[in-house]
Amino acid sequence: MLPKATTTAELARDGNAKRIDFLRLNPGARQVWVDSGHAIPLEKPEAIVGAIREILPTLRRQER
């Protein structure tokens, strides 16, 4: 069994690699890191609102 620090580091690297793979599925995607726990909408609602406001003009242009 690996020491906890090594196991944690391996899990972090694996998780980061999977996030990069998700981004590759959509070339227009962008990853945003928020200093929060798992409940981002409750803990940092301004991050959610900001992301929505950022994408709305693009979506509106696509509707035309």
Image: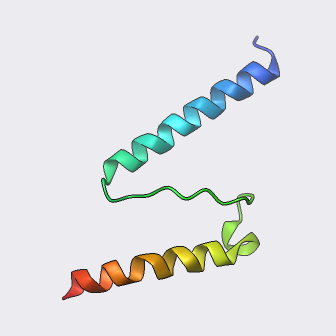
Give the residue displayed 30% in from the left and 53% down from the top.
Answer: 27
| Horizontal relation, residue 17 to residue 61: left or right | right
| Horizontal relation, residue 44 to residue 48: left or right | right
Quarter of the view holding residue 20:
top left
Give percent across and percent down for residue 8. Answer: 73, 28
Give percent across and percent down for residue 36. Answer: 74, 60
The image's colouring method is rainbow
Quarter of the view holding residue 29:
bottom left
Instruction: Report the front residue among 25 and 55.
Output: 55
| Horizontal relation, residue 41 to residue 1: left or right | left
Quarter of the view holding residue 33:
bottom right
Give percent across and percent down for residue 38. Answer: 70, 58
* Residue farthest right in this picture: 4
Above or below residue 35? Residue 8 is above
Give the residue displayed 79% in from the left and 23% down from the top.
Answer: 5
* Residue farthest top in this picture: 1
Placement of the N terminus among the 4 image quadrants? top right
Give the residue displayed 32% in from the left and 59% down from the top.
Answer: 28
Instruction: Report the front residue among 42 and 51.
Output: 51
Give percent across and percent down for residue 37. Answer: 75, 58
